[in-house]
Amino acid sequence: KAIVYPNPFKEQATIKISNNKNVIYTLKLYNDLGQKVKTISNISGTQIRINRGNLKSGVYFFQILYGGKTYTEGRLMIN
């Protein structure tokens, strides 16, 4: 399970996951049209920081993958 805070956010959000296996994850971020807008690879640990960068305000969906399969997914909002 993933916890996103703050949500909604303006500049940066943190996604907290349980990484009991000490493995490497990949995060994929999609806009509300299902288009992939960001990929973050080689994630280890329990916190993933998402910087807004050039992302527009709106709802985004994320997928965290491990070994090519979905580990968890969720939603975040940018103000």
Image: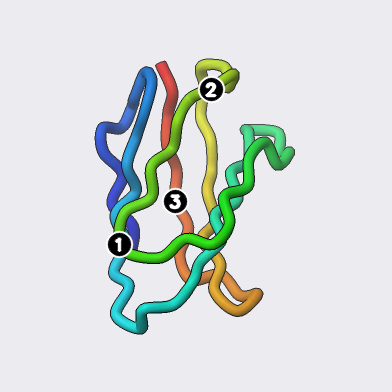
- The residue where tag 1 is placed is 46
Q: Residues within 10 Å of mark 3 (few under 14, many from 20)?
A: some
Q: Amino acid at mark 2?
A: Gly
User: Residue at position x 45%, y 65% from top?
Assistant: 72
Task: Please give the count of numbered marks on the rendered protein.
Answer: 3
- The residue where tag 2 is placed is 53
How far apart are the alpha carbons under marks 3 and 2? 20 Å
**Which secondary structure, mark 2?**
loop
Q: Residues within 10 Å of mark 2 (few under 14, many from 20)?
A: few
Q: Earlier in the sequence, mark 3 or mark 1?
A: 1
Which residue occupies the foreground of this view, 69 or 20? 20
Whether the residues at callouts 2 and 1 have beta carbons within 8 Å, the answer is no
Residue 13: quarter of image? top left
- The residue where tag 3 is placed is 74
User: Residue at position x 31%, y 54% from top?
Assistant: 47
Q: Position of residue 12 (x, y in %)?
A: 36, 28
37 with respect to 77 (left or right): right
Question: Eyeballing the image, is 53 above or below 17?
Answer: above
Q: Position of residue 10 (x, y in %)?
A: 37, 18
On-image quarter of the C terminus? top left
Question: Eyeballing the image, is 44 above or below 77?
Answer: below
User: Residue at position x 28%, y 51% from top?
Assistant: 3
Q: Position of residue 53 (x, y in %)?
A: 53, 22
Which residue occupies the foreground of this view, 19 or 72? 19
**Which secondary structure, mark 1?**
loop
How far apart are the alpha carbons under marks 2 and 1? 22 Å
47 with respect to 30 (left or right): left
Q: Earlier in the sequence, mark 3 or mark 2?
A: 2
